[in-house]
Amino acid sequence: MKDNLLRSVVTLLPIAFLLSLFMLLPAEVLKGLAYQRDNGQWWAFLSAGWVHFELSHYLGSMVGLLVMWLLFAEHLQPVPVWLMLVVAATASVGFEHWLAQPPFFAVTIVENRGFSGALYGFFAWGAMMDVLKRKPFGWLLLLLVLGKVVLEAILGEPLLSFSSVQQVAVMGHLGGALSGALVALLWWYGSKRVTA
C-alpha cells in the first residue's frame, strides 16, 4: 500500500505540476502552444494536449488525474504512464487534425487544446492493464471507454460534457483512448519479452 502511494505520487505529481505550470503562462503564450489548424506549427501537436482554455478546464483535468489514481493506482509507474500520456496527448491532437473536418465531421475544428484526450488515453491504458492482469471489470471498463469515444466520434458531439468549452474534441478523445490502449498492450508485451 505504501509502495503504491509513493509510486503514484512520483508518477502523477510531475504531471500535475507540468499542467499547472502551463496554466500559469500568459494567454498569448498559451494560444501559441494550442493547435491552430491553419498555422502549420508542428510543435502544437506536442504542446496542445498540455494547455487549457480556462481555469475550469484545467481543474477538470486535475480531477481526472485524481480519478485515474483512484481507479488504477496499482498500475502506476512513472515511465510507462509518462510515455503513454505523451503519446495519447499527441495522438489526440493528431486525430483532431485529421478527422475533425468534413467528410468525417460536420464542421472543421480550427483550434484544439486540453488534457482530456490524454485522460481518455489514461483511462483506456488503465482498463487495458486491468484486462491484461485479469482484474475483475477490466473488460467492462475498456468496452465502456472505447464504446463511449467511438459513439461520440460517430455522433460528432459528446454524450456528457462538464466543460464550458463550446466544441468538445470528440475525435481527440477517440485518438487518446485508442493510443492509451495500444501503449498498454505494447508495454505489457514488450516487458514480457525483456523478462523472458
Image (cartoon, rainbow, N blue to C red):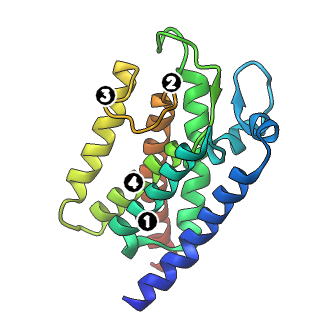
For label 3, the residue is 151
Determine which residue is flagged by label 1: 188
Q: Earlier in the sequence, mark 1 or mark 4?
A: 4
Between label 1 and label 4, give the one nearer the viewer: 4
Q: Residue at x 45, y 78 (%)?
A: 196
Residue shown at the point (51%, 74%) measured from the top left: 77
Query: Which residue is tagged 2?
Result: 167
Q: Is residue 84 left or right of residue 130?
A: right
Label 1 SS = helix
User: What residue type is disc 1 on?
Assistant: Trp
Residue type, numbered disc 2: Gln
Residues at marks 1 and 2, CA–CA distance in whole angstroms: 35 Å
Comes first in the chain, label 1 or label 3: 3
User: Disc 3 on helix, strand or loop?
Assistant: helix
Q: Residue at x 72, y 58 (%)?
A: 21
Q: Amino acid at mark 4?
A: Phe
Give the alpha-carbon distance from disc 3 to disc 4, as whole Å. Answer: 17 Å
Mark 3 residue crowding within 10 angstroms, few (<14) / some (14–19) / many (20+): some
Labels 1, 3: front one:
3
